């Protein structure tokens, strides 16, 4: 009888020990949870245990590690934390199309609030630039243009003194591009008569060297083209192909359709030889083929072109013909031509120069600068 009592007391004691031990262990688990141990460390400690037994014993999911197993525990807080600040989203942007057949250069987004308000530069003939000079007309113009943060740089042809399409010409084009530096990415080249002295070979080198829109008329890949920038449309024509002094019918037909289909505030047209020269290139420009010249000008007039820009004559000048204003920027780094006779032009300047055109909606201001940065003339369109 005493032996049975002893066994009974021993059994009760063992059971109480098991219960108290389990309770003590569970309490330790709860304390560790409150203290926030590393999840992986706690899991490593509990992994060998039979968690389901604890679940049954305490009526809770002890296997759910973390504060969710402690309904009365407060969430961890960080004292003296500053109130969150509201992040202002960036201004919406308008991306200029970058289809390689329309405009391979204009990939950068344009801030929406600036749309329709920008400037572009115009480089005249640079055929006598010296790549090793730092103070040449070309170099000075590039330095001043860079400071003005223009959106586009246009050229007026005769980049070089000659181009036979061989390696010497390619080397010279490379030097020309080096002078431009970072501006080359936003520069649209235009072919002049000196750039095409090698005929078809010069054409092939031009197409190999430059990356320009390919949307021009058949046979004029990268030699004639158009593109859009913000609220304006730019057209580049070739006055040297298939021969000098003419914008041929193929280009004129393409031009008429291109201008008719576009819906932009401004339309700017560029080609090397002026339709109406005012000085040393009279008879050596588009006026040498008057019927073709007149057909071209009629299209420009009918399609309400904002302005026409040319080079070839080594002066700066302005002349309005039948409602369309012609601007000549012909000498950024070349030699001087004579100034026009009285009344041949509304404005003229002899000396190295470049242009900055400011666009604000439909209001356009054409500025003539000397290569050292002095403003020589400022003219507003429409006039």
Image (cartoon, grey):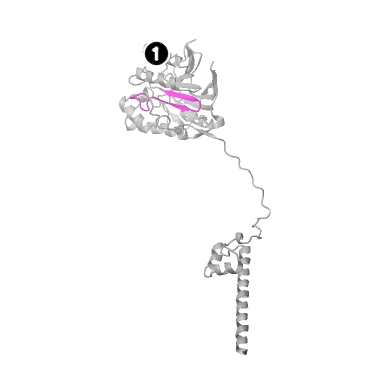
Residue 225 within the magenta-colored segment of the rendering: yes
Boundaries of the magenta span: 217-236
Kindly tell me whether residue 250 is visible in this rendering. Answer: yes
* On screen, residue 44 above or below 322: below
Q: Which residue, as the protein is rendered here, is positioned at the far bottom? A: 2
Quarter of the figure with the C terminus: top right
* On screen, residue 196 above or below 58: above
Residue named by callout 1: 295
Residue 15 x, y percent position in the rendering: 60, 78
Residue 128 x, y percent position in the rendering: 41, 26
Q: Which residue, as the protein is rendered here, is positioned at the far top? A: 343
Side (left or right) of 227 relative to 38: left
Q: Quadrant of residue 336?
A: top left
* On screen, residue 41 above or below 212: below
Taking depth in this image into account, of 209 and 172 the one nearest to the observer is: 209
Taking depth in this image into account, of 115 and 148 the one nearest to the observer is: 115
Kind of element beneath mark 1: helix
Quarter of the figure with the N terminus: bottom right
Side (left or right) of 172 relative to 357: left
Q: Please give the count of numbered marks on the rendered protein.
A: 1
Kindly tell me whether residue 164 is visible in this rendering. Answer: no
Residue 305 within the magenta-colored segment of the rendering: no
- Residue at position x 68%, y 55% from top? 79
Q: Which residue, as the protein is rendered here, is positioned at the far right? A: 80
Q: Quadrant of residue 204?
A: top left
Residue 108 x, y percent position in the rendering: 48, 35
Q: Quadrant of residue 249?
A: top left
Residue 175 x, y percent position in the rendering: 40, 33
Dot 1, crowdedness within 10 Å: few (<14), some or many (≥20)?
some
- Residue at position x 47%, y 21% from top? 267
């Amino acid at each position: 009888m005493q032996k049975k009592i002893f066994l009974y007391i021993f059994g009760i004691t063992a059971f109480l020990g098991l219960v108290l031990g389990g309770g003590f262990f569970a309490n330790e688990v709860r304390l560790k949870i409150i203290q926030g141990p590393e999840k992986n460390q706690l899991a490593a400690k509990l992994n060998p245990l039979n968690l389901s037994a604890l679940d049954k014993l305490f009526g809770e999911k002890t296997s759910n590690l973390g504060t969710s197993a402690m309904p009365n525990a407060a969430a961890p807080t960080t004292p003296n934390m500053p109130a969150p600040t509201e992040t202002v989203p960036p201004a919406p942007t308008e991306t200029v199309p970058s289809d390689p057949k329309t405009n391979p250069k204009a990939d950068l987004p344009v801030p929406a609030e600036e749309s329709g308000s920008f400037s572009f530069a115009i480089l005249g003939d640079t055929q006598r630039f010296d790549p090793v000079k730092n103070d040449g007309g070309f170099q000075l113009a590039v330095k001043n243009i860079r400071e003005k943060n223009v959106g586009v740089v246009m050229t007026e042809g005769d980049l070089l003194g000659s181009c036979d399409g061989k390696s010497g010409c390619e080397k010279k084009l490379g030097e020309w591009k080096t002078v431009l530096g970072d501006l080359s990415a936003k520069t649209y080249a235009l072919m002049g008569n000196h750039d095409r002295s090698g005929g078809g070979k010069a054409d092939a080198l031009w197409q190999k060297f430059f990356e320009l829109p390919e949307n021009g008329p058949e046979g004029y890949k990268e030699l004639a083209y158009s593109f859009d920038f913000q609220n304006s449309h730019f057209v580049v024509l070739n006055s040297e192909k298939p021969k000098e002094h003419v914008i041929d019918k193929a280009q004129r037909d393409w031009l008429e359709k291109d201008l008719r289909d576009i819906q932009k505030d401004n339309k700017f047209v560029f080609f090397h030889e002026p339709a109406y020269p005012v000085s040393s290139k009279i008879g050596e420009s588009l006026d040498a083929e008057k019927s073709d010249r007149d057909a071209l000008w009629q299209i420009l007039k009918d399609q309400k072109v904002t302005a026409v820009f040319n080079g070839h004559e080594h002066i700066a000048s302005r002349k309005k013909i039948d409602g369309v204003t012609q601007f000549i920027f012909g000498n950024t780094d070349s030699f001087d031509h004579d100034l026009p006779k009285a009344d041949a032009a509304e404005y003229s300047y002899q000396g190295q120069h470049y242009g900055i055109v400011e666009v604000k909606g439909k209001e356009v201001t054409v500025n003539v600068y000397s290569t050292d940065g002095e403003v020589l003339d400022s003219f507003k369109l429409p006039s």
